[in-house]
Image (tube, rainbow, N blue to C red):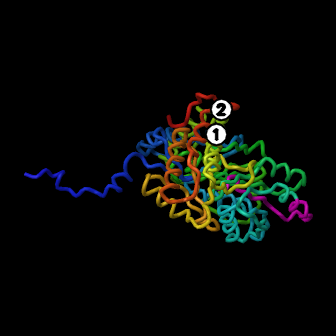
Amino acid sequence: MQNSRQSRPEPADREVFMHQGRHFLQIPGPSPVPERVLRAMDMPVIDHRSAEFGELGRTVLEGSQKIFQTAGPVVIFPSSGTGAWEAAIVNTLSPGDRVLMVETGHFATLWRQMAGRFGIEVDFVPGDWRRGADPAVIEAKLTEDKARAIKAVMVVHNETSTGATSRIAEIRAAIDRTDHPALLMVDTISSLGSVDYRHDEWKVDVSVSCSQKGFMLPPGLGFNAISEKARVAAKTNKMPRSYFDWEEMLKPNAKGFFPYTPATNLLYGLREAIAMLLEEGLDNVFARHQRLAAATRAAVNHWGLEVLCQEPSEFSPVLTAVLMPPGHDADQFRQIVLENYNMSLGSGLSKVAGKVFRIGHLGECNALTLLGALTGVEMGLSVAGVPHRPGGVDVAMKLLEQRPQGNASPHLKVVGT
């Protein structure tokens, strides 16, 4: 009798090669979910009105405050980051209000579009998608606003489409120099838990974030960290809301509960993710991301390719966006890397579609993970026929071999190991 295994058609060699080993998810979010977090979520659903759940709720709400670096309330919605954007708008602004935003990239543009749908008048400062928001421009705009008509300054901290960060502390200082009463609202969706961010110290009024980036969770949770000034604004603004009403959330949150059914298993994962970040130490987390980003840029520069972000003080620790040489399509290159090496790279979005690919190096990422990713990119450049100088991985390796500076110990505990 013929062996049943021999009778099955064998897949093509390329397909066997493609699916060997673990997939490298090197997009800038959703980021890979660590095994510890996956195991923590593998729990039965419990009664969300029970004392056991109340303890879970209090733990994640208090832990989230530590990650935002705030003593004020953090609201957790069962939503995407887009839902958290909406919550920031509907709790603080009224139709017809004027806000100041900066075109730093694709996601700043989307937030602007959302504000417009709610009847907000947006003063949108144009940008070239190659750097963050300019504090001097924001200062000048607020100085010109003699009538104090601008109700909020809304900035994306880490622009995921471009790999450029905005200098929030300097923007806060610029606002303070004008003595302008505008709220400061910051999108920390791709930066929180990966880039140094200080809600209280920088006097941010609303910080917006979500679960699938630095928190290393699946998508499904949205966050608002809220100042007292923002809560005062929420008492008088005219925007209707129900699901995203802060005060309706904060009442039961005081005892660890939620006004509607929460995402229980994601909260189990959030509790574990917060524990992991605090075990490593936030300063070490931030230093690790800086080192990985510097190694990535060193490889890109050696290859002779160009980093999209042009301002060194604004290089993102979360991702690196790489410009393709003229005549080469970034999406075709990404497809070649995926088919040959089972690795996903981030695509270019809207204005830079087909022009850039993005290397994510956030969350559960260490030196060996990054070097594997950079090796895949370098091999992909060769297979795709993209002009480059070989040896970028070696340059990155030499940088990562150096003793870390600052708070990061050379033997620091890496998240997920």
The kind of residue on which mark 1 rests is Arg
Q: Where is residue 134 in the image (x, y as percent from the top left)?
A: 80, 56
Q: Residues within 10 Å of mark 1 (few under 14, many from 20)?
A: many
For the record, the magenta segment spans 140-159
Which element is circle 2 on? loop
Q: Position of residue 52 (x, y in %)?
A: 49, 38
Q: Position of residue 301 (x, y in %)?
A: 65, 50
Splitting the image into 4 quarters, where does residue 119 fall? bottom right
Are discs 1 and 2 less than 8 Å apart at CB? yes
Q: Residue at (78%, 58%) from the top-left corner? A: 153
What residue occupies the far left of the structure in this picture? Answer: 1
Q: Is residue 103 above or below residue 407?
A: below
The kind of residue on which mark 2 rests is Pro
Tell which of 379 and 221 is nearer to you.
Answer: 379
Which element is circle 1 on? helix
Tell which of 344 and 376 is nearer to you.
Answer: 376
Residue 92 left/right relative to 220: right
What residue occupies the far right of the structure in this picture? Answer: 146
**Label placed on residue 291:** 1
Q: Where is residue 206 in the image (x, y as percent from the top left)?
A: 72, 52
Can residue 250 be seen from the camera position used here? Answer: no
Name the residue carrying label 2: 404
Compute the Cα span from label 1 to label 2.
Answer: 8 Å
Can residue 378 be seen from the camera position used here? Answer: yes
Tell which of 257 and 141 is nearer to you.
Answer: 141
Q: Residue at (18%, 51%) from the top-left corner? A: 5
Between discs 1 and 2, the one toward the N terminus: 1
